[in-house]
Image: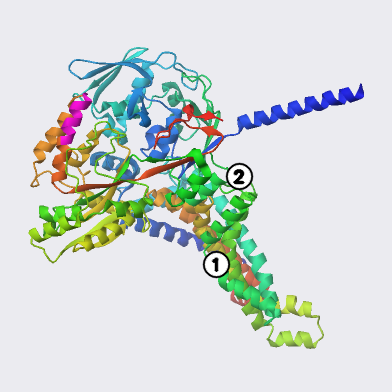
Amino acid sequence: MKTKSLGLGLTMAALLAAGSMSARAQDKPVKFRTVASISSLDWEQSTNTRDMKVWHQMFEGLYGMDEAKNGYYNELGKKFDLSKDGLVYTITLQPGVKFQNGEPLKASDVVFSYKRAMKNPRFNYLTSPIADVAAVNDGTVKITLKKPYAPIAHTFFSVKIMSEKEVTNQGAKFGTLPHKAGTGAYYVTSYNIASGAKLEGFKDYWRGAPALHNIEYIVIPDDTSALIAYQNHELDYLEDAPLSAWKDLAKTAGDNAKLIKGNNIMFMAVNYLSPRKELANLKVREAIFYAVNKHDINLAVCDGYGAEATQYMPSEYVATSPVKGFQTYAYNPAQAKKLLAEAGYPKGVDVGTILTYGSSTSNNAKMAQVLQANLAAVGINAGVKVMEASFVTPKLYAQDYDICIFADSMNYDFNNIRQQVHSESKGMYVVKYQGGPFNWQEMEKLVDLGASTANTAKRLETYTKLWSMVMDTATILPCLHRPVGIVWSKNISIGQPVPTYYKIRTFAKR
Amino acid sequence: MYRYVIKRVLFLIPTILGVIFIILLTMSFTPGDPARALLGASAPQADVETLNHELGYDLPFTKKYVNYVTNMVVHQDFGTSYFTKQSVFDEIWPRYLITIKLAFLGVFLASVMGIPLGIYAAVRQYSLWDTIPSLMAFLLAAVPAFVLGMVFLFYFSLKLNWLPSYGIDSWTSYLMPAFAISIPPAAMNLRFTKSSMLESIRQDYVRTARAKGAPERVVIWKHALKNALLPVITNIGLSLGSLIAGAVVAEKLFSIPGIGSLIVDRIGYKDEPVIIAGTILIAICFTVVMLIVDLIYAWIDPRIRAKYARTKG
């Protein structure tokens, strides 16, 4: 009898211990890295991608974004009706959506969120096409545009809907404290601007509670430290893993490692307005472009894992980005020399300085050094200057450079080229086309035409013409798409990896 | 002595005013502005100018300086971060405490490792007890903290899995960064202590103590060391200052939310309120440490006490 009781007791104890261990495993947070402080919990306080990645777990927009499937999808907006004149969107909201504070989503919250964003100059580029936002009833919103504007989809995705009540209650402190103002699958339970944030799954999330309950974002600025933390099982998801260690990392992580094309691009630009008069010569600019060996740049910047670029934006992420039908200036040193000779510089030419920003070991600096060597190989001499971004950017916008290297990322609509080629885009372009020896008026017309229709095929055709014109000027040359290396722990499955806006709600436990 | 302390404390005032002046002046020379950094490249210039105006960034230099000092002195207000919209003091203080803890721990370890080895090396000059530590000090003084940090991370976190690789959740989190930052100053302490002790043990008063039959332990620890410590203490004070300001390397490597990494991060955003307040706190700490060093000097060396006594008279 005693033995039986002892056996029963031991079994009970073992079961309890197993239960407690399982509960602990259940509660163990899944850890993500962020490279710097999360600046705020208010999505309106920054346009920084690292902050937005966190906010995308907490907030949702009328549209969602699925980079793996090339575009936007309906999120809080269930149905979008566009008036015949292309000016008024009548949007039926998704039924049964609750904010994390338990309040139901209403049209007035959408109006509140849009009006708040429209007052914020940071989002002028998104909200300026909107004339008015009004609630038709609790479940319907009307958004009126100033003119037909297809890229408004990006606004529908970017403007996140918040609970008016929660934001108003927190007042000026909103963004600095944990809140439940979003409709997303997670809300923040603990926030320390210095070290990161802890998030908990929202049980009443309208798509169903997420599989991973506890999430933690940890600030780890140094790449190597992050790598060690991942290898030491202290991190569950590591984005932008250092490419120099990718081979070993991929071997260790096995199926839990993926290298994908990033939604980014590194460009070089030649300033035809430079005091170096040689650069006003189209043949010299073309010679420079033909001299660029993108393969070398890829090796120097991304250990060869990147993708040589010809597009203004990667078409994998931007459906309207032209893929062919334009000049690409494939590496051809013989052609570069021939063009130089035709331009009157058979013995070579000095073209001033290649200017870029970042540290001396940054990707831009590496590319500048390769570019310098590529140009020298065909007789084009240039110095290299690498300086602080805050110093270089104004110079680029003022066309105060000879040759420059710059980067862009996170574009989801080709209309973004407007800031580069349209005269209304004041102080935001690297090459000033307006008033130059190019048909800039036609370029502007094409920009406006591309934005005026929602027909993707028509937009693609328009933008192909536009991009072809830009490439013919030999002023901007896309060079490289950097890859994004993602590794994750064996405890989770992440579905189809995406370069930026991963959704933790779609992750699962293993 | 009290007068001296009060004088040194009062000296903090021009120091802090000078720090604010230099930072504001330096920031005014650097290109860019906070509104552009906050609103991004695509924001219209008019919006950028409006925000700069709201932040008070476009004020003339002298007005900005006077406003800052007035707010700090009258309202004890260090301002609001341009970047996070949080109170600068609330943001800085917890980080400052972490950096101070780390720096003090670093100095403590540097002293505990460097000074006894330096004494031993001096006492056993030309033996292996001298050669090996001296050689190691020579090498380690030249190894930067981030290299040591990487080595520690690799072995103690990755290979042995003994210590956490990031953050500052428990006392174990302090071990690797504190050792990483303490080894180069420990090597310096060893070299300073050794050379100072060698000089000290050849002095007449040490020979006299030995001639009087004092045990060697007493000769070394009481007579020689007390005098030899003066330059070592100066070095410790200076290294504490450089560890506070220079902890940024360890903070970045070990993902420690300290004040150094905060200042470096915010320079990119021209977040002047945070940069100035952070620098002021570092300057205050450094000045206080140097004051303590001077007081220890006076405590150790009766000649200094006598000098102050004469000044008073």
Chain letter of disc 2?
B
Q: Alpha-carbon distance for marks 2 and 1?
A: 29 Å
Which quadrant does the C terminus of chain A fall into? Answer: top right
Chain letter of disc 1?
B
Instruction: Identify residue type, mark 1.
Output: Leu
Mark 1 lies on residue: B238
User: Residue A370 at x, y = what percent?
Assistant: 29, 58
In the current view of this chain or complex, which residue is farthest to the right? A1
In the current view of this chain or complex, which residue is farthest to the top? A137
Magenta stretch holds residue A460? yes
Disc 2: CA contacts within 10 A as few (<14), some (14-19) or many (>=20)? few
Residue for point 17% across, 52% down: A271
User: Residue A60 at x, y = what percent?
Assistant: 40, 25
Q: Is residue A431 left or right of residue B199?
A: left
Magenta stretch holds residue A424? no
Instruction: Identify residue type, mark 2.
Output: Asp
Which quadrant does the N terminus of chain A fall into? Answer: top right
Q: Earlier in the sequence, mark 2 or mark 1?
A: 2
Q: B220 or A143: which is nearer to us?
A: A143
Q: Is residue B299 left or right of residue A255?
A: right
Mark 2 lies on residue: B169
Q: Which residues are magenta?
A: A454-464
